[in-house]
Amino acid sequence: MSRVDTEPLAASSAARPRRLPRIDRRFLPVLGASVVLVLMLLIGQLRYSTPHRGFISLRLFSNLVADNSYLLVLAVGMTFVILTGGIDLSVGAVVALVGLVIAVLLTAGVPLPVVLLIALLVGAVCGTLIGIMVHYFDVQPFIASLAVMFLARGLCNIISVQSLSITDPGFGRLASWGIKLGTGSDVFRINASLIIAVIVIVAGFLILHYTRVGRTVYALGSGDDGLAAGLMGLPVGFTRVGVYVLSGVCAGIAGIMFALYTKSGFNLTGIGMELDAIAPVAIGGTLLIGGSGFVLGSVVGVFVYGLLQVIIAREGLDSWWTKVLIGVFLLIFVLLQRVVSARRSKG
Amino acid sequence: MIEAVPKDAPPLVAMHDITVTFPGVKALSGVDFRLFPGEVHALMGENGAGKSTLIKALTGVHHLTRGSITLDGKPIQFRSTAEAQAAGIATVYQEVNLCANLSIAENVMLGHEVHRGPFVHWRATQARAAEYLQRLHLAVDPRAQLGSLTIASQQLCAIARALVLDAKVLILDEPTSSLDQQEVAELFDVIREIRDSGVAILFVSHFLNQVYEISDRMTVLRNGQLVGERMTADLPRRELISMMLGRSGEALAAIEGEARTRTEEDRETPLFLSARDVGRRGSVQPFSLDIRRSEVLGLAGLLGSGRTEVARLLCGADRADSGEVDVDGQKVTLADPLTALKHKIVYSTEDRKRDGIVGDLSIRENIALALQARRGVLRPLSRTELDAIVEKFMVALDVHPNNPDMLIRNLSGGNQQKVLLARWLATDPTLLILDEPTRGIDIGTKAEIQRLVTQLADDGRCVVFISSELEEVMRVANRVAVMCDRAKIGELENGPSVGVDAVLEEIGRASEVKTDAA
Amino acid sequence: MPHDAQSQSREVVDRQNILVRATSHHMFWPIVALVVLLVLCQVMSPGFLAVTFTDGHFFGQLVDILRTAATPALLGLGMALVIATGGVDLSVGAVMAISLSLSLTFLRGSSSPDSVGTVAVAVLLGLVVALVIGAFNGFLVVGLKIQPFIATMILMVAGRGIAMLVTKAQITTVTSPPFKWLGSGFVLGIPTPVIIALVVFVALTVLTRWTAFGMLLESVGINAEASRLAGVPSRTLVWSTYIICGLLAGLAGIVYGAPTMAADANNIGLMKEMDAIMCVVLGGTRMSGGKFYLSGTLVGAVILTTIERAVIVFHLPSQTAPLFKAIVVIAVVVAQSSRFRDWAQERRLRRQAGSDSIPAEKVIV
């Protein structure tokens, strides 16, 4: 005797009756961010298009990606951390540290592949430190990552207070390697950073949605501090430390990308960069309390962020307006998040 | 000390001389326990008897100070729940410990997903999940979020997860606390099917009727020690209760039969609060209630029937959408707890850990809290005044240890409850709404609190008494309002001829009406 | 057991109890850290701890440390109240910049920047704006129920932009002795910022410990719902902590910028919110909220400033200060963490245990 006689896929009496299928609600924040992105593009198109050249062009996207590829990578790592209900404030400092390490090691003649590997290792070590403090010593992620941020900055300052330029020819080739597709405003540049960013995004997506560890990330953010996940036999410790390691490695990768971009290592790099990473993640629909959000949402968030800066530049406003407007955007998105999650909890 | 006749088949799980010690405390001492395949074995005992500890010792959460466990004849010593699960011991907890933000398929299958290469093959995994859900007669879309299901269905998902683990032993810890009668019946059908397929089931519940209905064998613990193991059919209820309670059962028996009856004079006591059609969307349907001085009004009903929601509306914790409330003849709007406090209405919550005690504050500060809040931020209680109040109530309620500087979270549950009662009593309230005041408390303190309730009514105050233990409600209440499915369905006068069954009948009748209408 | 052995073992237990109580006191590790730092500095640079009275005021490294510590102290005192409610205020650095920029811009635009009256108005202006920002933060957190971290981050990001707009991205400079006195003057020989910080400390202590404000605040931080049900006006209390924090951040900005009389809106207050949080945490207040310690926060501020000074004394580049701050914070936070305390307690009890003299109490499981 079946408990419910209706077809399995329709709203059964076991689920409270809903007008919309359940799956929609989880995607609402990301859809919202995407709508905003489209709106911004349309506004730009209407305002800044000239008879010769529309605002929306391949070149626009090419520049957006090129300028923000390091942010895309940071946002992926940060998404994992925030999904577990944590936060990583050290990423900016790690980016700076990695840049300096690269500069020093290349100048010392260490082969490029080894240097890149060490760069990733530096990020991983920083992440591991945070993860251990959070998981084994019950230190709040805010404080733990803050401490590691100071640690990394301190190490940066010890290495050098002056900008170190990177003159290694192999590195230079990597930095200038690129494929240009098309001409004029239909140009799209592919460089190493873009490829790396795409790989990271795809990898992040696959790990989050198609592996057990990825689903454990969500389980950790369900609000009970990993209790249910532990009782379900999921790898709580590994995952909780792992997300910080992942964020650290992403910071390492971003550090490499930033070094490719600036061809130097500088200890004042990346101050405030962690917030540049957190804001897009929040805008992209990931709830800061954890448990809900998507990597692709953060990608949309980064594009919103980048597009905002483009529009501000086009308007001829001081770049300081970026900060103000980002603040306003964040406020709007967070309010929208609250509305969505309030409805979810009431239902 | 096993007096029951053993079955022919050897036990699946044999625990021998189990002793578990925490720093300074012996939680279990020399306990033997056996689980046979194809059997439902109930573990009985009051709160604090050691049931949870025994289960945690079996599943690897607690380390054994002494004793041994064998599974299928082989000695085992699990170091984590993961190891226990891998060996085929699955536990379904009272609070459905699954992740509401994940899908049903994920909750059921995570840890045993179907893989394609290094990645999870979701379609296949969801199909397998659907198979297991089907075995439990649960027809839901495995892709839906777990949080969209009712608690009863979520519990079935938790059991489905246990089946996925191919469990040889299934531990059900208070599985029926949130279920209505229909859902309990369906759950028991499922349990019987699982039992008949050869699984050993450990069943923990404080609902004696249910235990007698579903179990084949019982083991009773008291104070961390084994009292005995019996076959259910051979154990009359009275004997079970005396095994569970020991000598303290006498204290309860003394209150038993004291069921308060109302005489003609009682009916004349002044009306304190009158609620007319008070309701809140999504919380409870409009209800009307009269609360008189010198009276204990019981609110009876199953978990989820809306009793707490009624309480919260009466004390301002929630704001009503509709209806009117009169206090002492004047219309009032109970907009927040502070307003209710000023009208001498107080509310003691059902989950003292979650929204009752302020853990890191001292006993003194916890007692002072409501009184201070009512006085306002800028008028602190003087130390002498405060000490006098604290002393008075700590003595009157017999709080142990008698140290007002101690942090409240270091007290036992019973003493915490007493401190909370002191907090409310310190404000000299007229109406006390007590929600599950004896939950998770040892038997001696339970009796004290029940006696206190009747005394409060004798002093001229009003008490609204909410408890899932109907026996308790019938013991102290003059009148009983019955709730079912978020609506008040009736009121009964308490009396010698009225008992638990009358209330259950009322609830049953109401839910029947509902299913007929559906 | 023979009588002597019994009383002896009781003595041992008593002594151990004192030790336990001392080491788990919230001020223990921070004070130890501070003393160690000061001693190391004295060893490295003899005369470090020397204080003299010349030119009508106190003089010495310690005096400088105290003067510099006034800024993080003011920030930390406000932050402690916010953290006690379970929140955080990341905008304090930006508020410092805004208040200072406004005050200096007003002074520069006024006709008599030297007069005490104008300075008073300028300071008041800066403080009022800081108060308004604090109220806004409170509104976001209490009214709109946004998570404090995000709510104050919005102002942290936007606020700096606002400060830049006020100063039009120029570094504002102006000359005004009365204003400068706020940062580099003396009262009875003691640097003005120290006096200001002490006055604020005393005022807050009176507010929190002489009224019910402190206890009710802690109650809200530990269990907000239980407090609400007990009639505690949580919303008003939490809102007021953000207002106080904002106000003190404005004051800190003015005190900080007064000596140099320059407002570099881009850099002033950068990372100061992190320093403030560190002061609070070092003082024993947990980020999760609840019990808070104003005196501990002051000690935390002195520790942070001493680290910065110690770095110079040890002839290390001043930019290495963050590294040592990090080490101290990690050490203190780990030592304070419950896991560490449980581990230490368990070791102690395991040494005591093994005897049957421990009574088997009933445990409510």
Image (cartoon, coloured by chain):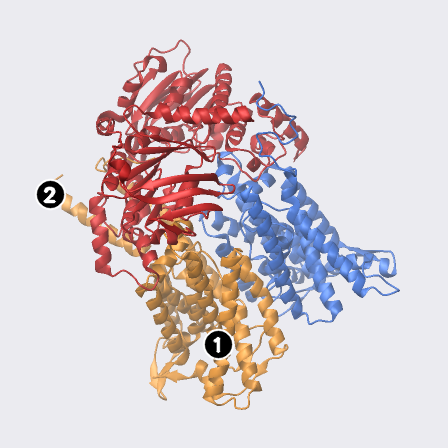
What is the chain identity of the residue bearing mark 2?
Answer: C
Q: What subunit carries mark 1?
A: C
- Image location (x, y in percent) of residue C102: 55, 78
Q: Earlier in the sequence, mark 2 or mark 1?
A: 2
Which residue occupies the foreground of this view, C122 or B120? C122
Q: Would you identify the image quadrant in which residue B36 lies?
A: top left
Q: What quarter of the picture does the C terminus of chain C occupy?
A: top left
Question: Does residue C280 appear anywhere in the picture?
Answer: yes
Is B227 placed left or right of A178 in the picture? left
Q: Amino acid at mark 1?
A: Tyr
Q: In blue, which chain?
A: A
Q: Which residue is at the front of the view, A181 or C77?
A: C77
Please state which of residues B510 and C321 is positioned toward the viewer in this rendering.
B510
Q: How many marks?
A: 2
- Quarter of the image that includes the N terminus of chain C: top left
> Which chain is red in the picture?
B
Residue beneath disc 1:
C256
Q: Residues within 10 Å of mark 1 (few under 14, many from 20)?
A: many
Q: Nearer the viewer, residue A322 or B86?
A: A322
From the viewer's perspective, is residue A47 above or below residue A28?
below
Q: Residue at x 49, y 67 (%)?
A: C321
**On the image, numbered disc 2 is attached to which residue?**
C3
Counting other residues with Cα less than 10 Å from the Cα at mark 2, is it few (<14), some (14-19), or many (20 or more)?
few
Q: Is residue B378 above or below residue C129?
A: above
Element type at marker 1? Answer: helix
Picture quadrant where residue A69 is located: bottom right
The color chain C is rendered in: orange
Q: Position of residue C351 (x, y in %)?
A: 28, 42
- Residue sticking out furthest to the top: B8
